[in-house]
Image: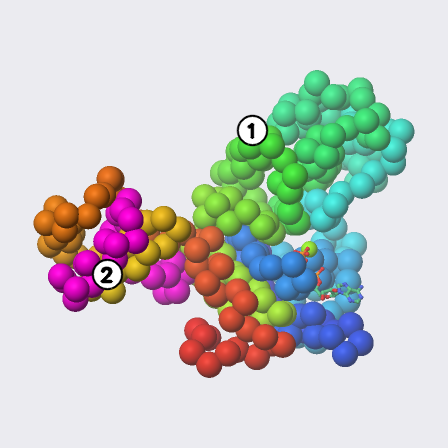
Amino acid sequence: MADAVHVRGLTKTYGSLAAVAGIDFAVPEGKVFAFLGPNGAGKTTTVEILEGLRRRSSGEVTVLGLDPWDDGRRLHAKVGVIPQEFRFFEKIHPVEAIEYYAALFGTRVDAMGLLRRVALEDKAGARFETLSGGQKQKLGLALALTNDPTICFLDEPTTGLDPQARRAIWQVIRDLRSEGRTVFLTTHYLEEAQILADQVAIIDHGRIIARGTPDEIIAQHGRPPRLRVQAGPGMAPYLREALGVTATFVDGYVEVPLPNKHEALRILSALEGSGVPWEGFATVTDTLEDVFVHLVGRMDDGVLKPGAPP
Ligand SMILES: Nc1ncnc2c1ncn2[C@@H]1O[C@H](COP(=O)(O)OP(=O)(O)OP(=O)(O)O)[C@@H](O)[C@H]1O
Ligand SMILES: [Mg+2]
């Protein structure tokens, strides 16, 4: 399968700051790619270079086979964009906004159909300045779809949305993928990335620190499965003593590594024999968010700390 986005050795410096410090990744056509990282990591800088809005300092970049800076005009016809913190003319209403965008692209569009798609049809005639934050985001998504794009760049499209609205946007993203479009998503909601993304890259201090499918990243960087028991702190030393395991007391639960199912039986019978009160238990595995929290912050000033994963 061809790549919709190809990036090699990309850098962007602002004065002495290397906001993007040499990154490589590819986004396969027709997939959802989530670009994750803490505030100031370099996501928007990268996205805007891919959109042709900022000039890179060095490196190779192609989007749909085009150089976004040199071939911006041709590229923009095929790209849908929601910028971070989307803004628009205060007095315009959503239908007018969509028609305005369509006119810029020289196309005709079913404005109400697009608004229905993002669950905003009830605000079709409301002035932009009266829309809530989430409704503005939804309009941004509708505008991004106005030109029937091959690839959409969505920079934090669900920030500030309520859970229902967020799920409505997730469905739009799934639909975009099922129509064969490529979606480049940045988000601070790791759950959203884990649910939606085919491929993920995590950027920190301008460098990519993990890449792959969500499952691959969790398998590579996450901790092994654990048995989590609802019990008092006294249970952890008891299990360490009785079983020779590395039981720890975390957030009100005792956690014990679970290399295999037989170990679960051994732990459960030790719990019964402990005399320490305990309630329920569950097996837990790391989420993408657990891995993200663990990985990010292990770098300082762009230098990996000893023992940190590459
Ligand atoms: N135009 C600019 N001039 C100078 N520095 C900039 C400029 N734009 C971004 N930066 C700096 O580059 C770094 C990366 O910023 P960027 O906006 O790409 O981060 P981000 O990953 O999108 O963060 P967030 O999650 O907060 O949106 C930050 O340190 C930021 O202060
Ligand atoms: Mg940003």
Looking at the picture, which amino acid does disc 1 mark? Gln
Label 2 environment density (alpha carbons within 10 Å; few <14, some 14–19, many ≥20)? some
Q: What's the residue at 69%, 58% (across, down)?
A: 44
Residue 217 among those drawn in magenta: yes
Residue at the image point whose x is 10% and y is 49% from the top: 273
Vertical relation: 295 (above or below) 34? below
Q: CA distance from mark 2 to mark 1?
A: 43 Å
The quadrant in which residue 258 appears is: bottom left
Instruction: Report x, y in % for residue 286.
Output: 37, 54
- Pick whichever, 42 or 40, lies toward us: 40
Residue ID for mark 2: 237
**Could you tell me which residue is drawn at 80 percent across and 41 percent down?**
87
The residue identified by callout 1 is 164
- The kind of residue tagged 2 is Pro
Residue 54, placed above or below residue 77: below
Which quadrant of the render holds ligand 1? Answer: bottom right
- Is 149 displayed left or right of 124 in the figure? left
Compared to residue 20, the image places residue 115 above or below, namely above
Instruction: Give the residue drawn at x 54%, y 67%.
Output: 297
Q: Is residue 224 magenta?
A: yes
Closer to viewer: mark 2 or mark 1: 2
SS class, disc 2: helix
Q: Is 303 in front, or is 219?
A: 303
**Secondary structure of the residue carrying numbered label 1:** helix
Is 144 situated left or right of 248 in this image? right
Residue 157 lies in quadrant = top right
Q: Which residues are magenta?
A: 216-244
